Image: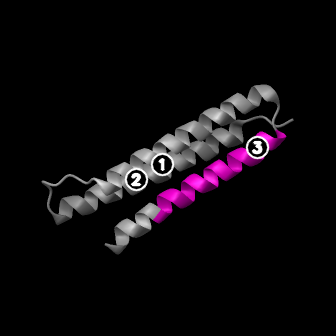
Amino acid sequence: MATIKNLKKDINFLSDEVIGNCFLQYYFAEENKRKEINKIIEEIVTMRNDLIKKVNNPPKDIDNKEKKSYFRNIQEELIKKANDAFAQLEQQPEK
């Protein structure tokens, strides 16, 4: 399925974008702020692994309409968590 392939690409892309922004913030942040940034990175890596696992292992007892809804929910969860991570990064005070 092409949509599953694209969903996996979206998961990896958004995860990489958040982590890349975290590393930029980490480079310029003070020591006490780096712990918060590390926490965000850990959350994003965990989120990425969980979402990929969900995409690779959909429930077997659902029909096609329910599968579409299942994958749409995964995509919505991805967008929500990525937006939350970006918002947390913006809240990090700068030097």
Instruction: Give the CA separation, mark 1 to mark 3.
Output: 20 Å
Residue 14 position, x and y percent, is 55, 56
Give the quadrant of the C terminus. top right
Counting residues from the start of the chain, the first of labels 3 and 2 encountered is 3
| In this picture, residue 88 sits left or right of residue 58 | right
* Majority SS type along the magenta span: helix
Residue furthest top as drawn? 32
Q: Residue at x 72, y 46 (%)?
A: 23
Residue at disc 1, secondary structure: helix
Residue 90's image quarter?
Answer: top right
Residue at disc 2, secondary structure: helix
* Residue 21 colored in magenta in the image: yes
**Tag 1 and tag 3, C-beta contact below 8 Å:** no
Q: Which residue in the protein does label 1 denote?
A: 48
- Nearer mark to the viewer, of 1 and 3: 1
**Tag 2 and tag 1, C-beta contact below 8 Å:** yes
Amino acid type at circle 3 is Gln
Counting residues from the start of the chain, the first of labels 1 and 3 encountered is 3
Amino acid type at circle 2 is Ile
- Is residue 2 positioned above or below 73 on the image? below
Q: Residue at x 56, y 52 (%)?
A: 15
Q: Which residues are magenta?
A: 9-28
Q: Which residue in the protein does label 3 denote?
A: 25
Instruction: Give the CA separation, mark 3 to mark 2.
Output: 26 Å
* Residue 87 colored in magenta in the image: no
Instruction: Give the CA separation, mark 2 to mark 1.
Output: 6 Å
Q: Which residue in the protein does label 2 denote?
A: 52
* Crowd tier of the residue under label 2, counting other residues whose Cα lies within 10 Å: few below 14, some 14–19, many 20 or above: some
Amino acid type at circle 1 is Arg
Give the quadrant of the N terminus. bottom left
